[in-house]
Amino acid sequence: MTDQSLAMTSLPKEIEAHYQQGQESERLARDRGELERLRTQAILARNLPPPPATIFDVGGAAGVYAFPLAKQSYQVHLIDPVELHLRQARNRSRKAMPAGWPFRTAAPTPFFF
């Protein structure tokens, strides 16, 4: 059994099928999703401790919140049960984040610490 199949077995099949479509990485960049993203970022800005601090983005999908936080000097650990999301985040990290930026993705397991 692969890491992906182990992680995905804990999700209901309809949720797994939805996320395997690969649209989550773009959902918060358009239409009503943009309002959700901007509102969540405002709430995070008001409530997070100042950087440097460690943030665990649990269920963080492809990193829509993790990347801006890492760019603000937070140490960000992205945790998601969907391997596709982690792969998208890793690809984005290689392209968008300079070497040494505080961004990490976790293996797709429910609890790894």
Image: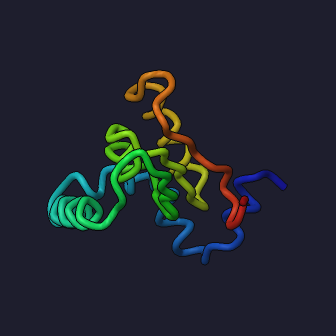
- In the rendered view, how is the structure colored? rainbow
The front one of 6 and 107 is: 107
Q: Is residue 97 left or right of residue 36?
A: right
Identify the residue shown where x is 52% and y is 52%. Answer: 78
Identify the residue shown where x is 67% and y is 64%. Answer: 8
Residue 113, compared with residue 91, is above or below; it is: below
> Where is residue 65 shown, x and y percent of the image?
35, 53
Q: Residue furthest top?
A: 99
Residue 38, compared with residue 64, is above or below; it is: below
Identify the residue shown where x is 34% and y is 62%. Answer: 48
The front one of 13 and 80 is: 80
The front one of 95 and 49 is: 49
Residue 103, compared with residue 80, is above or below; it is: above
Image quarter (top left, top right, bottom left or bottom right) of the N terminus: bottom right
Question: How many tags in the picture?
Answer: 0
Q: Is residue 79 left or right of residue 113?
A: left
Q: Quadrant of residue 112?
A: bottom right
> Where is residue 79 shown, x and y percent of the image?
57, 57
Identify the residue shown where x is 41% and y is 28%. Answer: 97
The front one of 107 and 75 is: 75
Residue 56, compared with residue 95, is above or below; it is: below
> Where is residue 95 shown, x and y percent of the image?
42, 25
Q: Is residue 103 left or right of residue 47?
A: right
> Where is residue 63 shown, x and y percent of the image?
42, 49
Image quarter (top left, top right, bottom left or bottom right) of the C terminus: bottom right
